[in-house]
Amino acid sequence: MSDFAHPFDAAIALAAATPNRRLGRTSADYWNMVSPYGGITAAVMMQAMLDHPDRRGTPLAFTINYLAPIDAGDFVIETELVRSNRSSQHWAIRLLQGEPGRVLAQVIAICAVRRETWSHVEATRPEVPPADACAVAPPRNATGFLQRYEFRIVRGKPFAANEDSLSHVWVADNPPRPLDFASLTALCDSFLPRIFLRRPEFVPIGTVSINIYFHAGEEALIRQGAAPLLAVAQAQAFSDGHFDHHGHVWSTDGELLATTQQLVWYKE
Amino acid sequence: MSDFAHPFDAAIALAAATPNRRLGRTSADYWNMVSPYGGITAAVMMQAMLDHPDRRGTPLAFTINYLAPIDAGDFVIETELVRSNRSSQHWAIRLLQGEPGRVLAQVIAICAVRRETWSHVEATRPEVPPADACAVAPPRNATGFLQRYEFRIVRGKPFAANEDSLSHVWVADNPPRPLDFASLTALCDSFLPRIFLRRPEFVPIGTVSINIYFHAGEEALIRQGAAPLLAVAQAQAFSDGHFDHHGHVWSTDGELLATTQQLVWYKE
């Protein structure tokens, strides 16, 4: 790990068996209970696409479904460029372990060449104090991926019976790291699980699907650098063993970088 | 077509080459400009999963990416059950045309057995007059899929420079047809394209990705029957050639049936 400047870079590092088949290894730095943090799994699958020699354009849409827990150790990522034209590419990506390989996560994603058009952001960023005026939340766990993020909670008290699940949180990689599409993908899973904003007690949960739309290009991510992002999310429904949330990720300067929704299994 | 009670049933009818390979044909009744209506393509791929002899549980999450226009005529749907356990199933589904088959749409989806848990709907349904108090919108086109829906627009005037893109629309299959997961999937693409709610002029558009979470089970769909659904949606961003929307589909009685987001290409 010490070959890398940041534990995130170590966690998403891939060796090439072939361009369509990459070899990775789970990271203790991004571990979560029984399996890797879902955000790091999404990020390493994003990275396999970003690294692919045929990749053109930048990520536009990315959907990951989690099939089963990933064991600590080696994994394979299979990347397929399903279709490519002048302006966009369609990808299918799978993460496997064991022989014969069991599929443990699957992704479909789109890359596109961004181009100048009429533009307008209709979503509105909530009014919040700047990150440096907000206290850093004490770590919820002594080890694992929660150590790898710095959270400043502006709205939404975890493990409380709040009247709604809306949260406003400044979030940054810890230690700080300049934003890129892989880390933005991971950050899209760093939202507090919504059920912990409605019920005071812990219940077992597990993310089953995340969908992300990227609304900004590489320049916006470079402008953002390592500064905290504003993450806003709210649940829509808790029903029959699954809840969702819908979220926005804003740059420090108020640019909408990504919108995301997520579906989460919960026990009871 | 006349073998079927409803043009929707004709449009999603599939013959089995094998359980994992089904044969279908595009429908003139659901045609849209240069290609089938995206909602009917989503519905027929959903139907291939629903019809599969190994399918258990009901749809929970469904994401479709559109790769290229589908020509009028025959197509193949390849359905793969990637993983199955006691409570959930993960699927990958592709629509192909030609020899060798070109992939024109790809889906990843999850089915799950719904179970009793603590439940709470946090999204709120807007206050709107009942459907039968709202005028049916005149058809926007004389032929094609828009004829297959009855729209009653409560909020959001198309082809106008509205101050936001929020729309409230009662929508039903035309002629009426009892709701099921295939038709609910199709209805999730019946929202007005958001750009037509912000700009008075027509611009070429095309949906590239739809994500749907199903929040209710089969009983709720049966209760709904053929009555109009309330479809609510709003764009979040128009930028660099793509816009999105985030939407809710409510039953007549105010039950949240589905949440959905969609990404759409636009020309300028």
Image (cartoon, coloured by chain):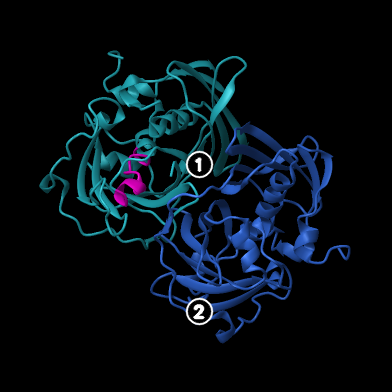
Chain colours: A cyan, B blue
- Give the residue type at disc 2: Val
Residue A26 occupies which quadrant of the picture? top left
Residue that mark 1 sits on = A63
Residue A69 shows in this picture: yes
- Give the residue type at disc 1: Thr
Name the side, left or right, on which B50 lies relative to A200. right
Identify whether A117 is placed above or below A12.
below
- Membership of A194 in magenta stretch: yes
Residue A227 shows in this picture: no
Give the residue displayed 38% in from the left and 54% down from the top: A235
Q: Secondary structure at mark 2?
A: strand
Give the residue displayed 61% in from the left and 38% down from the top: B89
Give the residue displayed 46% in from the left and 20% down from the top: A71
Residue that mark 2 sits on = B154
Quadrant into which the C terminus of chain A falls: top left
Residue extent of the magenta highlight: A187-199
Give the residue displayed 47% in from the left and 24% down from the top: A70
Q: Residue furthest left?
A: A133
Q: Main secondary structure of the magenta part?
A: loop
- Membership of B241 in magenta stretch: no
Q: x, y percentage for residue B193?
A: 54, 65
Given residues A21 and A54, the one toward you in this image is A21
Identify the subunit bearing mark 2. B
Q: x, y percentage for residue B259?
A: 50, 57
Quadrant into which the N terminus of chain A falls: top left
Q: x, y percentage for residue B62?
A: 58, 47
Name the side, left or right, on which B118 lies relative to B17. left
Spatial separation of the CA atoms under disc 1 and disc 2: 32 Å
Given residues A107 and B90, the one toward you in this image is B90
Q: Are marks 1 and 2 on the same chain?
A: no
